[in-house]
């Protein structure tokens, strides 16, 4: 099995910063794309940022210039540095990872349980 565990969420005032982490563990042969998604109350889950194994990054327009995604491939850990937070950034943040469990297996996407981020005005 593969587990993704997020940490680092919490309460912060608008304009503040938070850093999220997501550690992948378990039966892992290779990890390719990793990403952060979020879901606000009453809304669908949306992409925040992704990063591929070779390091190329993609950001949602709403977070471009404020959030930075990074990863430590040796530790299979994903990070999201969030600066200049706004109230509309409030939501549950989920990490995802595309994983191969062996060189014979296909790629599968795994999800963490989510971590709450609340930005107050």
Image: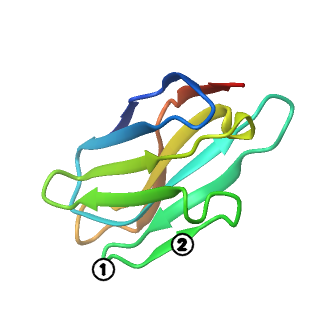
For residue 101, say whether it is visible: no
| Of residues 83 and 79, the one drawn nearer to the viewer in this rendering | 83
Q: Residue at x 72, y 45 (%)?
A: 45
Q: Position of residue 116 (x, y in %)?
A: 57, 25
Q: Residue at x 47, y 37 (%)?
A: 17
Q: Residue at x 80, y 44 (%)?
A: 44
For residue 73, say whether it is visible: yes
Left or right position of 91 against 21: right
Label 1: which secondary element: loop
Q: Position of residue 56 (x, y in %)?
A: 41, 79
The quadrant in which the C terminus is found is top right
Q: Residues within 10 Å of mark 2 (few under 14, many from 20)?
A: some
Mark 1 and mark 2: Cα distance apart in space: 13 Å
Q: Which residue is mark 2?
A: 58
Q: Position of residue 79 (x, y in %)?
A: 35, 49
Given contact means CB atoms under 8 Å apart, are the residues at marks 1 and 2 in contact? Answer: no
Residue 8 falls in image quadrant: top left
> Farthest left residue?
74
Q: Residue at x 39, y 39 (%)?
A: 19
Q: Which residue is mark 1?
A: 54
| Of residues 93 and 112, the one drawn nearer to the viewer in this rendering | 93
Above or below, 106 against 40 in this view is below
Above or below, 42 against 50 in this view is above
Label 2: which secondary element: strand
Left or right position of 41 against 66: right
Residue 14 falls in image quadrant: top right
- Circle nearer the viewer, 1 or 2: 2
């Amino acid at each position: 099995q593969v587990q993704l565990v997020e940490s680092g969420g919490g309460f912060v005032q608008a304009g503040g910063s938070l850093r999220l982490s997501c550690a992948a563990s378990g039966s892992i042969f290779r990890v390719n794309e990793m990403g952060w998604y979020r879901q606000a109350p009453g809304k669908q889950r949306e992409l925040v940022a992704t990063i591929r194994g070779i390091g190329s990054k993609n950001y949602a327009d709403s977070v471009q210039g404020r959030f930075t995604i990074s990863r430590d491939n040796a530790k299979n850990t994903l990070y999201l540095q969030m600066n200049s937070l706004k109230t509309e950034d409030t939501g549950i943040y989920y990490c995802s990872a595309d994983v191969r469990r062996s060189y014979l297996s296909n790629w599968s996407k795994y999800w963490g349980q989510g971590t709450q981020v609340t930005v107050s005005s």
